[in-house]
Amino acid sequence: MTDKNVILLASDHAAVDLKTVVAEHLRSRGMAVEDMGTHGRDSVDYTEYGIRVARAISEGRAERGILLCGTGIGMSMVANRFPGVRAALCNDLFSAGMSRRHNDANILVLGGRVLGDVLARAIVSAWLETPFEGGRHQVRLDHFNQGFCDPFK
């Protein structure tokens, strides 16, 4: 069962501070947040936390998530291995909007060592507020799923 009212959130140690900022921003917008870790600055493997969120999105337990690591690159790579996940690494407002408008991104990925707090909050807002256009973009998304091989089965 999908929970449309919760945003799943996870980071590694390199982005735990920005994750806190993002969580506060989401809550200030009246959104429910499920923080799936990590909760400290001790070194952890980002893959563990990316898998938690990506698997939940892939299995339909939530509609959207936000992942953070040092650059966002690793989390993007992990998340996009899961069927039905469209994770987008966004470092600017235009990319955040387009990731939703044309690609219906269901996971936003941010770099904790790349973005400042103000820009990160603005990116999250743009991502949340931008609807998917559908139409020709839906046709392209349908191509994503044709013949998709699930590496985790």
Image: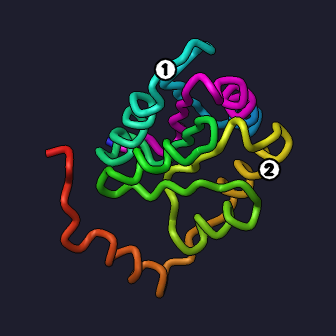
- Circle on res. 136: none
Residue hosting label 2: 122
Q: Position of residue 118 (x, y in %)?
A: 86, 42
Q: Is residue 33 left or right of residue 84?
A: right
Instruction: Classify 67 as above or below 63.
Output: above
In the image, residue 17 lies in the stretch drawn in magenta: yes
Q: Secondary structure at mark 2?
A: helix
- Residue 50 included in the magenta stretch of the image: no
Q: Position of residue 4 (x, y in %)?
A: 48, 45
The magenta-colored residue range is 2-24
Picture quarter with the C terminus: top left
Query: In this rendering, is residue 96 above or below 153?
Result: below
Q: Which residue is mark 1?
A: 44
Q: Residue at x 62, y 15 (%)?
A: 41
Q: Is residue 63 above or below residue 8?
A: below
- The residue positioned farthest toward the left in the image shown: 153
- Determine whether the residue tagged by mark 1 lies in a helix, strand or loop: loop
Q: Nearer the viewer, residue 5 or 14?
A: 14
Residue at (51, 69) in percent of width and height: 103
Question: Along the horizontal axis of the image, is 150 left or right of 25?
Answer: left
Number of numbered discs present? 2
Percent of width and height locating residue 68:
59, 37
